Image (tube, rainbow, N blue to C red):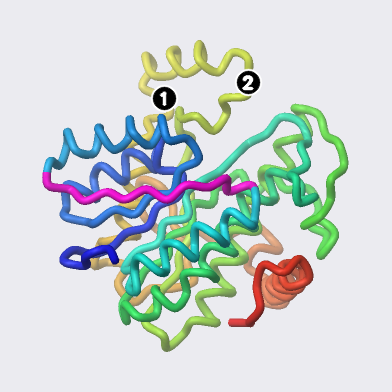
């Protein structure tokens, strides 16, 4: 059982990019970190970085592939056993794939990693979150959601059609739109539980998200020299939603990097009927696959 002397913070995608920066800053503030990872090597490097910045930090890693719902469920179950109370959940892991890949479970990979995984992990950790009485769920979305093509439900959740690198932006944008819709619907469903749920736009960040581009390494170096895409800005809005008193009690919102102000999402992101339809389609799909057994 993990000790609970400090706020327990679960973060996905914390072994690089803005998730890693957020983890380091939260460790400095005394958070007890529970991080998911696929690579033990990357986890070891990240653990060392956190300890260098905050020597007294407590860091625990749970391993799994977030493109596989069986792993998401397993990791969530392991964390729930270790932490009967969770104060902060940051769903940060994301992927921009430049070609269609289908997971072993038959899901389109970007939908699986960017949308289904945070949905299922949050669902699996719900008892621990409600036990906190004052928990915050933070979902990393994006203004890329404005470029999402046409949303088709429930078809988009299982659409494995091929796409080009150029066409990948529509799919990525769609996954981020789903994050925003999920956030607002979950915020309503958890009203009165003490758990708040908010999404954010981290802005453009030079991170590992676009690592599949052949020129990504060179591009990152150029942008760093030009001071463009500083990931610290993306990490900062994560931190604010996770711990800032300004957002205490606020739920179902979508907030911008830099200003921290509320953003109105592109249609149908703010459509309550569509949010509910998405929730029902997701719930039905994961129930059919055997990954969930109860409704929120």
Residue 262 location, x and y as percent?
44, 61
Q: Residue, x 78% and y 42% (percent of image)?
A: 102
> In the drawing, does residue 106 fall left or right of residue 221?
right
Q: Residue furthest front?
A: 1
User: Mark 2 — residue?
Assistant: 213
Relative depth, front residue between 260 and 195: 195
Residue 83 location, x and y as percent?
34, 68
Q: Which residues are magenta?
A: 56-67
The answer to which quarter of the image holds residue 154 is bottom right
Badge 1: residue crowd in 10 Å (few <14, some 14–19, many ≥20): few
| Number of the label disc, if any, that sits on residue 228 | 1
Could you tell me how far apart the alpha carbons at marks 2 and 1 are, in whole angstroms? 18 Å
Q: In the structure shown, which secondary structural element does the residue marked by tag 2 occupy? A: loop
157 to 284, vertically: above or below: above
> In the drawing, does residue 178 fall left or right of residue 211?
right
Relative depth, front residue between 172 and 67: 67
Q: Residue, x 55% and y 43% (percent of image)?
A: 94
Q: Was residue 66 drawn as part of the magenta stretch in this picture?
A: yes
């Amino acid at each position: 059982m993990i000790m609970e002397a400090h706020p327990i913070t679960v973060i996905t995608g914390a072994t690089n990019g803005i998730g890693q920066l957020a983890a380091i800053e939260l460790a400095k503030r005394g958070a007890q970190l529970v991080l998911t990872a696929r690579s033990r090597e990357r986890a070891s490097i990240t653990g060392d970085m956190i300890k260098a910045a905050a020597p007294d930090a407590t860091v625990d890693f749970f391993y799994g592939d977030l493109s596989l719902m069986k792993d998401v469920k397993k990791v969530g179950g392991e964390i729930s056993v270790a932490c009967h109370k969770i104060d902060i959940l940051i769903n940060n892991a994301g992927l921009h794939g430049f070609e269609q890949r289908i997971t072993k479970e038959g899901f389109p990979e970007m939908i699986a990693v960017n949308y289904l995984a945070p949905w299922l992990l949050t669902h699996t950790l719900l008892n621990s979150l409600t036990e906190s009485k004052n928990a915050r769920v933070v979902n990393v979305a994006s203004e890329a959601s404005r470029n999402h093509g046409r949303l088709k439900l429930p078809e988009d959740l299982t659409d494995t059609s091929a796409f080009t690198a150029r066409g990948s932006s529509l799919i990525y944008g769609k996954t981020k739109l789903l994050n925003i819709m999920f956030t607002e619907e979950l915020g309503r469903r958890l009203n009165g539980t003490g758990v708040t749920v908010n999404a954010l736009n981290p802005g453009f960040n030079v991170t590992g998200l676009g690592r599949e581009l052949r020129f990504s390494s060179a591009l990152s170096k150029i942008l760093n020299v030009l001071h463009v895409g500083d990931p610290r800005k993306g990490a900062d809005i994560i931190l604010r939603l996770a711990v800032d008193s300004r957002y205490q009690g606020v739920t179902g919102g979508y907030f911008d990097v830099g200003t921290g102000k509320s953003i109105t999402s592109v249609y149908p992101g703010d459509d309550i009927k569509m949010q509910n339809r998405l929730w029902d389609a997701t719930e039905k799909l994961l129930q059919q696959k055997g990954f969930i057994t109860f409704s929120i």
